[in-house]
Image (cartoon, rainbow, N blue to C red):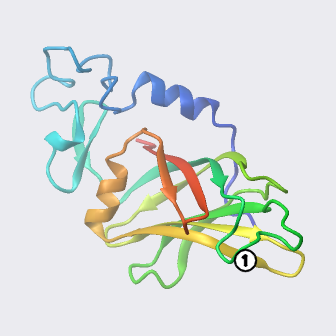
Amino acid sequence: MNLRHTFTDLSLVAMAALVGLGCPYYGGNGGGGYGDDDDAGGDGGCVDSFECDDLEFCNVGECDSALDRRYRVSVLDGEALTTGPDGSWDVGGGAPDLYVQFGMRDSSNDEWVDECFTETVQDSFDPSWNVYCEFVFESGGTFAIWAWDEDLTASDFAGGGYWQGNDALVAVIRGNGLTSSTDIGGSLSVRWVIEPTF
């Protein structure tokens, strides 16, 4: 498998989420969290992305353009049902060997433009990957997360989710450091986080 990005321990990502790099619950730059009477960034600042224009998000107390910038996407872990999309995960009923493919696809969602893969976690209903990659979320693009069950001869598609077009991409970006869980295919959910790299 050709890995186009380097995977890194997520302890720094978790710390960044806690100190609030734009996270609406913590106030991005030391001020502006809930219960604080001042704006997060002074005049024109924001505390929450919903205070910003349609294609913007709250980034460290200021409304910034959400698209055509680099983000770190962290794939944390997953939880699989005991049966896969087509019945048993493996011959004999064993646990799946799951990995995740994620990144940017073209505007028509036909092919990958920039992608990343986690390692395969063997025989697990609750795989933990804890990896991240960085991508540019381009205007009009598509962000996707697909899961695969690796088998001896080929990998079986376990399900996937995608966010296509500007409105969908901005909705994902506005999560800004909060953990999301995506049900991909009814048999598996994957937890992930997206954060700006500034």
Q: Identify the residue position indicated by label 1 in the image.
A: 156
Secondary-structure class at tag 1: strand
Q: Is residue 67 visible?
A: no
Identify which residue, 80 or 60, lies in the foreground. Answer: 80
Q: Residue at x 49, y 56 (%)?
A: 182
Quadrant of res 177: top left
Q: Which quadrant is the N terminus positioned in? A: bottom right
Quadrant of res 94: bottom right
Q: Is residue 22 left or right of residue 46?
A: right
Q: Is residue 64 left or right of residue 127?
A: left
Q: Residue at x 26, y 20 (%)?
A: 33
Q: Is residue 196 visible?
A: yes
Q: Which quadrant is the C terminus positioned in? A: top left
Category of crowding for the residue at label 1, using alpha-carbon neighbours closer than 10 angstroms: few (below 14), some (14–19), many (at least 20): some
| Residue 23 location (% of width, % of height) | 35, 32
Taking 37 as reference, is 156 above or below it? below
| Residue 30 location (% of width, % of height) | 32, 17
Identify which residue, 44 or 13, lies in the foreground. Answer: 13
Number of residue marks: 1
Taking 26 as reference, is 55 above or below it? below
Quadrant of res 152: bottom right
Identify which residue, 6 or 10, lies in the foreground. Answer: 10
